[in-house]
Image: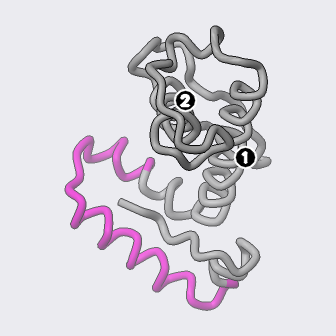
Amino acid sequence: MIITHPGGSLLHADSHAGEQSDLAKATSLALAIERHWGFGGSGLLWDGVSAADIWRAPADLRERVEAHLREAQDKALVTIRANRNVLETLAERLLRVRDMSGWDIERLEQDIMASNEDTPSTEAASGGQNTCLEI
């Protein structure tokens, strides 16, 4: 989980939940890119190194996995910042109603975007990248 403060900088990346944490899952994916799926610097090599065993992997592999994680974090922060209004409104609504369907969230996003038509688009705010909030 990534949380930002009003200035937009990173406050917290939840990594203390063990194997079920978002960071553990992201590490497993980044490690799979490098060692299981043949997309990394290791070529077509496959081995059984898991995220739990990452510290036994060579330093260059750990650095590449870290680079994948930092790139993903940077992209997530761009998306969060570009969709801040939607995310804050969604959080406020969830505090009130406690439960929303995917359709409810999409409708809320459409309503927010329609009310913001007079302001710069999220695409312009994100440097031209498509940062539509994925549900």
Kindly check if marks 2 and 1 are in contact, taking CB atoms under 8 A apart as contact: no
**Residue 131 shows which numbered tag?**
none
Q: What residue type is labelled 2?
A: Thr
Q: Which residue is drawn at 50% across and 56% down?
A: 87
Q: Residue 7: x and y, percent?
A: 79, 48
The alpha-carbon separation of the residues under discs 2 and 1 comes to 27 Å
For label 2, count other residues whose C-alpha is less than 10 Å away and answer few (under 14), some (14-19) or many (20+): many
Q: Residue 99: x and y, percent?
A: 22, 45
Residue closest to the far front = 44
Q: Determine the secondary structure under disc 1.
A: loop
Camera-side residue: 43 or 89?
43
Q: Which amino acid does label 1 sit on?
A: Pro
Give the residues drawn in magenta, as a range.
Answer: 91-120
For label 1, count other residues whose C-alpha is less than 10 Å away and answer few (under 14), some (14-19) or many (20+): few
Q: Mark 2 points at which residue?
A: 27
Main SS of the magenta part reads helix
Q: Name the residue under label 1.
A: 6
Q: In this view, does 92 lie above or below 125?
A: above
Q: Which residue is drawn at 58% across and 38% down?
A: 34
